[in-house]
Image (spheres, rainbow, N blue to C red):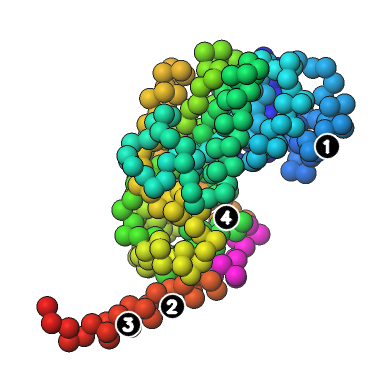
Amino acid sequence: MKILFIGGTGIISSASAELAVERGFDLTLLNRGQRGEIPGTEQIISDISDIASTKKALGDTFWDVVVDFISFHPDDLKRRLSLFKGKVGQFIFISSASAYQKPVVDYLVTESTPLVNPYWDYSRNKIACEEYLVGELRENHFPVTIVRPSYTYSETVVPLSINSWERPYTVIDRMRRGLPVVIPGDGTSLWQLTHNADFAEGLLGLFGHQGSIGHAFHITSDEVLNWNQIFEATAEAAGVNKLNVVHIASDFIVGCMPDKLGGLHGDKTASIVLDNTKIKRFVPGFSATRRFRDGIKRSIAYYDADPARRVIDDAFNANFDKLIEAYQAGLENAKSLFQGTPE
């Protein structure tokens, strides 16, 4: 099969590209060429937002499968369809499991769970993208398959409920220095973390699967952990014997740091379990085999292997120190208000 990845060098797409090469797919990556090459792939260097130059670079090639990792708004997809209508056998759009209904009504989430997220623009735009593509399928028979990853990580990512995405080692450094780390709520809400290599197995199983046209799938691990367990496993992997944790209500965090609204109330505050029955039915044999406790050891080892990777985000540290200070001041104030209150 002739495969095109739009993107191809991100956390999810790089693992998928490496597995595609391993399995002998004829894979081309379309991107701006800013993150280097993946051995075994062809590369078309073009800014896909420049339709004229990209159309010229693509020529009249027909692709069995196109996977779009980098569309975040329906306008992005309208440009994609201007390039690929009539030139693709299957168009796979990478959406997001954060699109599922918030606030949560049922902890068990399937692909038929409604797509509603009033908290996060990112998720609402992904929902709008899905609606646009379903309309194109219905009206113009555009061959779309929708895939919704959840929190997917690689060795370069330390996947916590609140962390510095750009400089993930920052939280590990806090743990190792005995500084407090924040876990939203009481840390007992349920979550699934998926290694990018496991996600790739499920995604590639859909390539060329004509029965998947018009369907949506999430692809995650079946390992369900709570955030306390996730932080504890991370601390253990980092060699930290005693983790210094401060549990803070998500409402308080968002009140102090409004930019956390989407990532918390729109995603990680919710206690959900994503049911992978559907992807297993369409891709027999698919199973996420990498436990988080093993995956996070690889992440810690990645940062420990090179001091240049262990960059600290000073702004992140300052903001979270202020958050913890505000929370502790609030506790002390509450104690003083309620002292002597009759039971």
Span shown in magenta: 308-317
Residues at circles 4 and 1 in contact by the CB criterion of under 8 Å: no
User: At numbered mark 3, what does the secondary structure look like: helix, strand or loop?
Assistant: helix
Sooner in the amino-acid sequence: mark 2 or mark 1: 1
Residues at circles 3 and 2 in contact by the CB criterion of under 8 Å: no
Amino acid at circle 4: Trp
Q: Nearer the viewer, mark 2 or mark 1?
A: 1
Amino acid at circle 2: Glu
List the residue tagged with mark 2: 325
Sooner in the amino-acid sequence: mark 4 or mark 1: 1
List the residue tagged with mark 3: 332
Marks 4 and 2 sit apart, C-alpha to C-alpha, by 23 Å
Queried whether the magenta region covers residue 313, the answer comes back as yes
| Of 332 and 103, the residue lying toward us | 103
Amino acid at circle 3: Glu
| Of 120 and 284, the residue lying toward us | 120
Residue 329: x %, y % from top left: 38, 81
List the residue tagged with mark 1: 50
List the residue tagged with mark 4: 165
User: At numbered mark 1, what does the secondary structure look like: helix, strand or loop?
Assistant: loop
Crowd band around label 1 with a 10 angstrom C-alpha radius: few (<14), some (14–19), many (20+): few
Residue 220 seen by the camera: yes
Sooner in the amino-acid sequence: mark 4 or mark 2: 4
> In the rendered image, which quarter contains the C terminus?
bottom left
Marks 2 and 1 sit apart, C-alpha to C-alpha, by 48 Å
Q: Is residue 84 above or below residue 47?
A: above
Queried whether the magenta region covers residue 267, the answer comes back as no
Q: Nearer the viewer, mark 3 or mark 4?
A: 3
